[in-house]
Amino acid sequence: MRKLAWIAAASAVLVLTVVIGVRLLGWQGASAQEVVNFDIDPDTTGNTASTLGTVEKCVRINGTFVKDGTSDYNIDVVVTGDTQAPTAYDADVTMDNDANVDVTAPGTNPVIKTPGAMDLSDTLPNTDARYHSGTFYLSGGPGTAGNGTITRIGLDIASSPGSPILITFTMDPNWTAYASSAGTHAVTADGAQLAVNMDCPSYADVEIVSQVVKASDCTSDPPATINALTGTVFCLRKSIRNNGPITPVDGTITTTLIQVGGTDCTITPVGGNPATFTGLTITPQTKDEKFTVNCTNRCTHSFNFTNTLAVTTVGVTDDVPANNTNIPTAFPTDVIGEADLDVTSVTVDAPAGSAVSTAFNVTVTANVTNNGPSTLVTANATLDLTMPAGCTRVPNTTQVAALTNLGSNSPVRTWSVTCTTTGNKTFNGSGSVVVTSDHATDSTSGNNSDTGSDSTDITASADARIQSWLFPDEMTTVAGNQVRVVPGVAEDMDTTETLDNNDGTYGGASIDLAIAVPATPGAGCAATPDAGNPTSATLLMNGTDVVDTLTWSVTLTPATSCTISFDKTITITTAGVSDSNLADNTASRTVILVADTDGDTVPDDYSGTIDNCPDDANPDQADNDDDDIGDVCDPDDDNDGILDVNDNCRLIANAGQENADSDSIGNVCELDVTCDDLLDGGDVVQLMRYIVGLLTVSDQCPPPTGSINGPRATAYNDGIDGGDVVAMLQCIAGFHNIVCPAPSAP
């Protein structure tokens, strides 16, 4: 089982442990802890779960060994740098000489550091030259903390003194992992060797630490462009060192520079390039190698440096060859030629005249020539048109023309222009050109642009309009506009005008208007305009209305009504702007002043409406006895011949003023607990609600909500009780009692 499969299994177990409540560390999502170093130790002496003997790089063993399914020699996978007990691990060991060695049981428990854990190691014997050991705790744990052996591997070897073998063990850090209760750990992994019937080699580790492409001085950045048919020197500067343990050592350097994807370049090493290194230690040495590059084709070229180090010191082996060859260092450069692009002139073409807010075309033409020496280059010509105030363009950007195989060319671009203000408008055009070929430059940039201009006369019209003119109307049920006034008293009357631009070609920000509003009062009327009434206005052309208030002081001489006529005219005063429609520049309105002497909103006498108390405000026009005299000015509201000031039942006729219980309320008003001047079922209901405790008593008439009028509630002046209810019902039914006695004989 490899690591990825192991992780999938561990993840499945994690789900299970959530269900059964057992702690188990998952590989994924945990935070990184201290680094754990995995090593192969071919000498198990002194190694336990928490201690280590000397970790050897190579061990020699002698003897005759045959493959028989049992272990001939054991090696340990050990860990260092760990400070916390493991909860799971993966160790992936690869060995060469697979024909002569298999993995078998070591003769002891192979799980050293994690006893009792679930073992997911490869099945033994293992014959594929790659062995995976791995465990994790489903329950219990963790394992043993500290530096020590994590697992022991038994080797079944085939070798004899006449057939020596060198077995190299390596570990892949991408397939090696370690976890503790704190989370996953970063890991490193190293290998070792087992020399069977032969001596262990000596080791060094020469390494290319870094390399970079430079210019010929080996310090400056390399040129991004070089000239065709001209030799250019490039330098490869690299840093090398020997990581030991055998040091110092000597060796060779092999470096090549090749062209990628082409054959037009000649590449020549510069004399004196180093081919060897001597005395290499851990202290880095800098090596500079130079090559001359000469290309014929003008295009983008790519080159690649490759180089390799090799140890030549006798008896020394480089045990880490992977870092002897640097990743190929590629670099691009452009091989270029030169041209001279020249904008000889720019022409702008605009119409002689146009109406305001009407689109018209303006073109810009740039005349471009290539003076060489490199010809047939590609370029971009950028044309632009600058707008004067009050004008806009579409598109509102510069425009680019792509020019190919440029010898001479005259690109043309057009803009749609609209001007919203009047006057002579000047349009300035410009043209510029730039080389776009990857392998060409412009040797003379001073002649790459030019300008030109043309002009257009813009004329306009507008349609100033009286959109609305609103007058007050205080009698909406009567046709026309009526305003109620107190005769002889001057009163202010406000009107609201709304002005706008209805149509036209004028596109400026605004136009100016003159406003004239004469008033013509009829007989009995007077009208004086307020000093603050506007006589002019500025009308914005962005759709915003102008709303003004015009006020007049109006007066009605003693009469019932009179008429005033108002006439309005607006005129455009902005110079150069005419009004295309004068029909909507005027408006007329008529207002009728209606007398309302007492100001109660009821006219004294107008259009069939007559105030029944013209000198006393009574907007409800209440008339209890229907004698066309309102209650507020009628001295006898019930027409019973008894003036209200003396009447003990003011709104119900009782000429005899009967009052059986001698209180202040006449009999006919007794028991009217709701004060509506009626004795009916409503009074019965309210009186009974009081008796059962649902209402209270009040002295007010009409009584407030939730109460009845107390003084009217008793017929016999003996308190409010069921007798009052009976008396009330008798009166309603037509019987006679103290409240409703029989009529007196004539």
Image: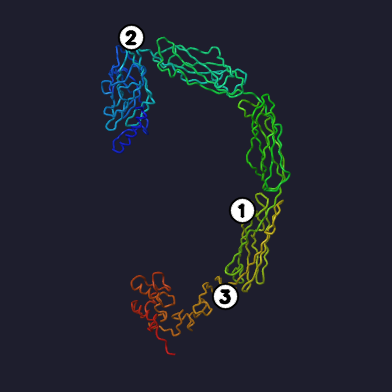
Q: Which mark is residue 162?
A: 2
Sequence-wise, which precedes: disc 2 or disc 1?
2
Q: Which mark is residue 473?
A: none
Q: Nearer the viewer, residue 330 or 34?
A: 330
Q: Secondary structure at mark 1?
A: loop
The quarter of the image holding the N terminus is: top left
Q: Quadrant of residue 137?
A: top left
Is residue 535 rendered to the left or right of residue 208?
right
Residue 43, image x and y in percent? 30, 17
* Mark 3, residue position: 610
Tell me, yes or no, whether the two marked residues, 2 and 3, touch with CB atoms within 8 Å.
no
Q: Percent position (x, y) of residue 575?
A: 71, 51
Residue 672, quarter of picture: bottom left
Instruction: Categorize mark 2 by other alpha carbons within 10 Å: few (<14), some (14-19), many (20+).
Output: few
Disc 2 and disc 1: Cα gap in Å? Answer: 108 Å
Q: Nearer the viewer, mark 2 or mark 1?
A: 2
Which residue is depicted at the point 37% across and 71% down? 696
Task: Give the number of callouts.
Answer: 3
For residue 544, which numbered disc appears in the image? 1
Q: Secondary structure at mark 3?
A: strand
- The residue located at (29%, 14%) in the rendering is 65
> Does 644 sit above or below residue 521?
below
Q: Is residue 386 left or right of residue 240?
A: right
Q: Residue type at mark 2?
A: Gly
* Mark-to-mark CA distance, 2 and 3: 144 Å
User: SS class of the residue under badge 2?
Assistant: loop
Label 1, label 3: how many angstroms apart (C-alpha)?
Answer: 45 Å
Q: Residues within 10 Å of mark 1 (few under 14, many from 20)?
A: few
Q: Amino acid at mark 3?
A: Ile
Q: Earlier in the sequence, mark 1 or mark 3?
A: 1
Residue 616 image offset from top left, x and y in percent: 54, 74
